[in-house]
Amino acid sequence: MEVIFNRRSIRRYKNQPVEPEKIDRILRAAMQAPSATNQQPWEFIVVQKKEILEKLASISPYSKMTADAPLAIVLLANDDKMRMKHHWEQDMAAAAQNILLEAAYLGLGGVWIGVAPIEERMQAIREIFGLKSKLKPFCIIPIGYPGKGQEHKFVDRYDASKVHYDMY
């Protein structure tokens, strides 16, 4: 459980490729996420081509670090697999968290770049990859070995004033 407490958003990366076996483990972790009625609507695009990473970096003011990452994973929800259509974002969020935790466990770093529900960002991803409308872009997670000044370390975020028992 130490990885939960130490994981931090990593926005700068070494110029070092991520090994295929680590990518595989990250994707396997993503697919172990809980899902409403076990619908598992997720699909993933693993991006390693520099020109595509640069396009992803331009979809929002918060995605610029994607251009310098050795890879990014784009999380998509497939509408055809949804039985609980109002819960797809929760399913995808659980998968995204698993990706970030497994990356940290493997000595890598990543950062969650929000896409959904901002339609212009979702549309930009659809256009970059030529996606059909049944695929809903959820987020982008650039991943790599932490660069200079970036590290996973414990920061105590516990706030007892936010905990309520039995009543608010």
Image: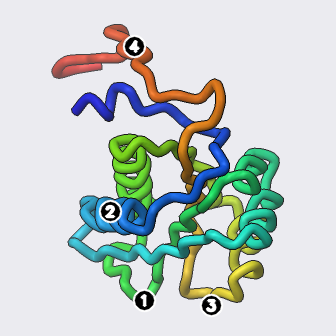
Residue 69 located left or right of residue 32? right
Pointer 1: residues within 10 angstroms few (<14), some, or many (20+)? few
Going 30% across and 66% down the picture, which residue do you hit? 28
- Residue 125 in percent (x, y) is at 70, 73
State which tag comes first along the sequence, 1 or 3: 1
* Proximity of marks 4 and 3: CB atoms separated by less than 8 Å: no
Going 74% across and 72% down the picture, which residue do you hit? 52
Q: Which residue is mark 3?
A: 132
State which tag comes first along the sequence, 4 or 3: 3
Going 56% across and 38% down the picture, which residue do you hit? 146
Q: Which residue is mark 1?
A: 80
Helix, strand, or loop for circle 3? loop
Q: Which residue is mark 2?
A: 25
How many badges with numbers are in the image? 4
Pair 1/3: label in front: 3
State which tag comes first along the sequence, 4 or 2: 2
Which quadrant of the figure contains the C terminus? Answer: top left
- Residue 78 in percent (x, y) is at 46, 81
In whole angstroms, how far apart are the C-alphas of marks 1 and 3? Answer: 11 Å
Going 60% across and 59% down the picture, which residue do you hit? 140
In whole angstroms, how far apart are the C-alphas of marks 4 and 3? Answer: 42 Å
